[in-house]
Image: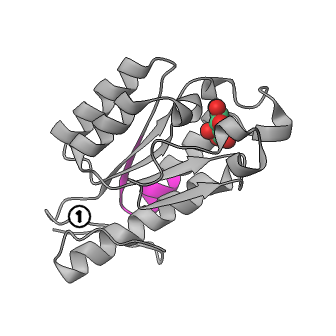
C-alpha cells in the first residue's frame, strides 16, 4: 500500500486505506460570500470546499463536502457516513447548532469523531448563539476564525488520523 507523500501529512486510516473526512455545512451556508459578510466574510462555500478538497488531496486523504438546508438531509448524510466508514467529520451545523437534538443524536450514534466549526465567534454574538448542542460531543470547537477555521479543523483531523494509525489505536484525542 503506498501513500502519496507531499512533505505535509500523509494520512492513512486504521484500515490502511486513505483517510476519509466528511465536511458538513448546515443551513444558509450556501449563501456564503453574500450573506452578512461582517459575520461570515466574503469567501463562498465553493471557495471553502475547493480549498479543503485540495488540502486533502495534498495530504493523500479523501475529503468530501456536503451542504444542505434541511435537518433530515444532514442526518441522513451522517448515517451514510457511518455506512461509508468515514474516519472524521468537520461540521458547521449553522443555525442547527442551537436547536438540533436530532442532528446531535445522529453524530452520537455514528461515533465518528468530529470538530465543530463556526465562521463567526458565536460567544461574541446574541445569547441564543452561546449554546451549542454539539460542543460537548465534539473533539474540539473552532469559532470566530472565518474560513480559516475549516482549514484548521481539517489539519487537526488529518493529524489525528495519522497519530491514530501510528499508535495503532482508535482513541479519540482531546485537544483541551
Ligand atoms: C454559524 C453561527 C450560527 O449561529 C449561525 O446560525 C450560522 C453560522 C457560523 O458559522 O458562525 O448560520 O454557525
Q: Quadrant of ligand 1?
A: top right
Residue sitting farthest toward the bottom: 167
Percent across and percent down for residue 145 are 71, 56
Q: Is residue 165 left or right of residue 15?
A: right
Q: How is the image coloured?
A: one colour
Residue placed most toward the observer, 132 or 91 = 132
Residue sitting farthest toward the front: 127
Which quarter of the rendering shows the N terminus? bottom left
Quadrant in which residue 139 is drawn = bottom left
Answer whether residue 60 is magenta in the image.
Answer: yes
Q: Which residues are magenta?
A: 54-64
The residue carrying mark 1 has its beta carbon less than 8 Å from ligand 1: no
Q: Is residue 67 left or right of residue 80?
A: right
Q: Is residue 176 left or right of residue 74?
A: right
Residue under pointer 1: 13
Residue 59 in sight from this viewpoint: no
Q: Residue at x 32, y 73 (%)?
A: 162
Dot 1: element: loop
Q: Residue at x 26, y 59 (%)?
A: 18
Amino acid at each position: 500500500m503506498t501513500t502519496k507523500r507531499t512533505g505535509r501529512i500523509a494520512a492513512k486510516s486504521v484500515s490502511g486505506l486513505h483517510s476519509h473526512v466528511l465536511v458538513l455545512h448546515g443551513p444558509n451556508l450556501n449563501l456564503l460570500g453574500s450573506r452578512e459578510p461582517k459575520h461570515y466574510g466574503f469567501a463562498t462555500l465553493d471557495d471553502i470546499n475547493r480549498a479543503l478538497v485540495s488540502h486533502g488531496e495534498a495530504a493523500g486523504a479523501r475529503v468530501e463536502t456536503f451542504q444542505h438546508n434541511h435537518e433530515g438531509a444532514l442526518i441522513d448524510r451522517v448515517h451514510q457516513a457511518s455506512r461509508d466508514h468515514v474516519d472524521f467529520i468537520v461540521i458547521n451545523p449553522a443555525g442547527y447548532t442551537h436547536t438540533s437534538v436530532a442532528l446531535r443524536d445522529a453524530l452520537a450514534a455514528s461515533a465518528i469523531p468530529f470538530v465543530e466549526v463556526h465562521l463567526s465567534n458565536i460567544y461574541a454574538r446574541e445569547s441564543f448563539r452561546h449554546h451549542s448542542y454539539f460542543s460537548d460531543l465534539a473533539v474540539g470547537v473552532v469559532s470566530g476564525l472565518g474560513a480559516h477555521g475549516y482549514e484548521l479543523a481539517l489539519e487537526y483531523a488529518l493529524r489525528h488520523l495519522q497519530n491514530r494509525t501510528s499508535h495503532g489505536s482508535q482513541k479519540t484525542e482531546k485537544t483541551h
